[in-house]
Amino acid sequence: MSANPATRLALVGNPNCGKTALFNLLTGSRQKVANYAGVTVERKEGRFHAPSGREYALLDLPGAYSFHAASLDEAVTRDLCRGYYPGEPAPDVIVCVVDATNLRLHLRFALEVRELGRPMVLAVNMMDAARRRGIHIDLQALERELGVPVVPTVAVRRNGARDLVARLDSLAGSLHKPERRLPVDQAGSIEALHAETRRLLSLAVAMPRRTAEVDDRLDRWLLHPVLGLASLAVVMFLIFQAVYAWATPMMDLIEAGTAVLAEGVGGTLSEGPLRSLLVDGIIAGLGGVIVFLPQILILFAFILALEESGYLPRAAFLLDRMMAGAGLSGRSFIPLLSSFACAIPGIMATRTIQDPRDRLATILVAPLMTCSARLPVYALLIGAFIPQQQVWGVFNLQGLVLFALYAAGIVSALAVSWVMKKWRRDKSEHALLLELPSYRVPHPRDLLIGLWERAWIFLRRVGGIILAMTVLLWFLLSFPAPPPGATGPAIDYSLAGRIGHAMTVVFAPLGFNWQICIALIPGLAAREVAVSSLATVYALQAADEAAVTEMLTLIITDTWSLATALSLLVWFIYAPQCLSTLATIRRETHSWKQVGIATGYLFALAYLASFVTYQLAVLLGAG
C-alpha cells in the first residue's frame, strides 16, 4: 500500500460509451455503491493499484450528454467535475470516455469537459469494434489538436485498460490543465462545439460508413413495426419462463439447507423463547425469503443483458407509439422495465424524461410494474396452487401464470396512464429523441458484477429490514402469553393475533384470513416480508415445527382455498405495500399530494380487483 494519498479519478462520458465496463475492468469487485449526499443519484466508487504500486480512487459519474444539464444526473456530473458539489472534493484527473465508433456524438461532450480547464485524459473506448468496422482514428493527431493525452481502451478485454493505467502512471503529478481552445465568447456555444467536432473528425477520423452493417441488418428485423414487436413479446415471455425453469435446482438446495439449519439449531437448544425466536422467527422467516434469490437473480440477469446489448433503447422506440396513446412516451419504457427489478431505481430513472408531465405519469404508474419483491409471494402461491405441468407440450403452466401476472401489471399501468391523460389539460404530444447504440455482446464480467451488486443489496435487505420485521413480528405473535385456563391456540391471545382478527372485518370480503392480515402489516416495509411473516405465523401456530419450516407451501395448500390464493395474487399486483417506494415518490416529486394520490389509487385498485376476483372464484366453485 502506497503511503501517498490515492489519486482521485472521475470517469465521465455519454451514456453507452462503455464507461461502466471500463470501471468494472479497473476495479473488479473492489467497488461500493451509494447515493450522493442529499440526492437519489447512484454513485459507484472503487479503487485499484497500478503496477507501479500507486493507488487510484475511481468514481464512475452518471452518464451525461452535455453540461447544459437537462436532468439531475447531468447536473451532478457537471457540478462534481467543476468541483462545486458539496461534500465531494474535485477530482485530480478527469478521464473522459468516448465511443470510437460514434465520435461524431461523443467528441462534442469531450470538448465541453476540456473547456473546464481541469487535468484530463481522453480514453477512446471500443477500439476493437472500430477496427472491425474499418474506422481509422489517428490518435496522435487527436491528441495534438485536443491538447490532452489520448489513450485507446477496450473495456471488454482483460488488459484493455493497460495503456490507460500506464499513461496515468507516467503522467502522475505532471498532468497540466489543458488550454481552453474555444474563444471565450464561444465557450458555451453549441454551434462552436459542433464546428470544432467536425474539424477534429475531418483531421483524425476516417469512417467508411456512419453505421455498422450488422446493426443495419438487425434493425431491419428488430425495429420492424410488426416483427419487432413480436420479437419483443417473445423475449419477455421467455424471461418469465426461465425464472421458473432455471431457478428450481438452486431453490431446492436453499430449502434443504434451511431445513437442516433449523433442525440443527432446534436440536441444540431447549424449549423456550430463545429457541422459538431462532427457529420459528429468524430461520423460518429469513429462509422463506432467501429461497427466492435465484429467481430474482435470473430476472436481473436478463434485464442487465438487454441493457448491455443495446436493445433497450430500440424497445423504447418500438413501444413509443403504443405508450403515447396511453399518455406516456418511449422514454418511459426503460424506467418501467427497471421497475420490474425494483420500483425505486425505476422511479429514479425517470429523471431522463425531460417532459415534466410524462415524468410524473411514469412515476405514478411505476409501482404497478411487478418488482422482484413481489416474486417471492407469487412463487409461493403459484407453487402451492398451480400444478407444475406442460401446456401444449412446450410451456410451463406456472410460468404462464407468472407471465399473466406481469402482463396484468403492464396493462393496468397503461390503463391508469390513459385515464390520467384524459384528465390533464395539456393534450400535446412530444417527439421521442433517442440514441441507438451499436449492438454488443454483453461481457460476462459486467453481468456477474451487476448480479453480485444486486444480490448483495437483496441480502442486506434480508439482514436489515426483513430481519427486523421478522423479529418484531415474532415478538407480537409470542406475547402476551395466554391466560391460565385458556383453551384456544396461544397465538390467538397475542398482540398480532388480536390485530389480525380485528382486520378480518375489512378484508374478509377478499377471502383473507387473519394470518394473511398479519402478514400484510410488516409487508409495508418490504413486500417480500409477507412471505417470512406467513412462515413465522404458521411456524408458531402449528404443532409440527419441522414441517412448517420445510413445507409452508403444503400448509397454505391445506388451509387456504384457491379463491383466497387468487385474491391475494391480485392484491399484490396493485397494493402499495412498500414504504420505500412511497418515500422515493416524495423525494422525486417533492409533493406529499402525489404520494397520497399514488397510495389512494393503488389501494383502491387492489381492494376492488381482489374483491371481484374472490367473489367470482367463489361463484365458480373455487371457494
Image (cartoon, rainbow, N blue to C red):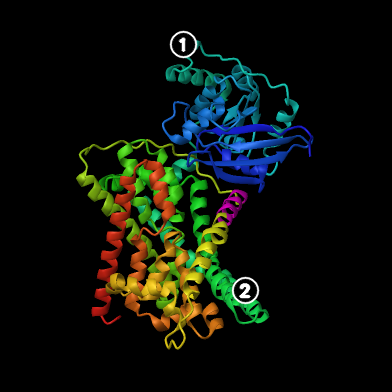
Task: Name the main secondary structure of what is drawn in magenta.
Answer: helix
- Counting from the top left corner in percent of width and height, residue 554 is at 47, 81
Relative to 285, 501 lies left or right: left
Question: Circle 2 is placed at which residue position?
Answer: 257
Residue stretch rendered in magenta on the structure? 445-456
Q: Secondary structure at mark 1?
A: helix
Quarter of image, res 384: bottom left
Asked if residue 232 shows in the view, the reply is yes
Give the quadrant of the N terminus. Answer: top right
Q: Is residue 449 magenta?
A: yes
Q: Position of residue 228 (x, y in %)?
A: 37, 50
Please report whichever mark, 1 or 2, sits nearer to the chain's N-terminal start. Answer: 1
Task: Compare residues 502 and 98 and report the one nearer the observer.
Answer: 502
Q: Amino acid at mark 1?
A: Asp
Farthest-out residue, front: 484
Q: Considering depth in this image, is 268 or 355 the residue closer to the camera?
A: 268
Does 382 appear in magenta?
A: no
Q: Is disc 1 surrounded by few (<14), some (14 to 19) or many (20+) residues within 10 Å? A: few
Residue 311 image label: none
**x and y percent of residue 258 in the render?**
60, 73
Towards the viewer: 591 or 180: 591
Q: How many marks?
A: 2
Question: Residue 187: horizontal and vertical position, in percent?
Answer: 49, 16
Give the image quarter of residue 357: top left
Q: Residue at x 24, y 74 (%)?
A: 616
User: What numbered label is drawn on residue 185?
Assistant: 1
Label 1 to label 2, Cα distance in Å? 69 Å
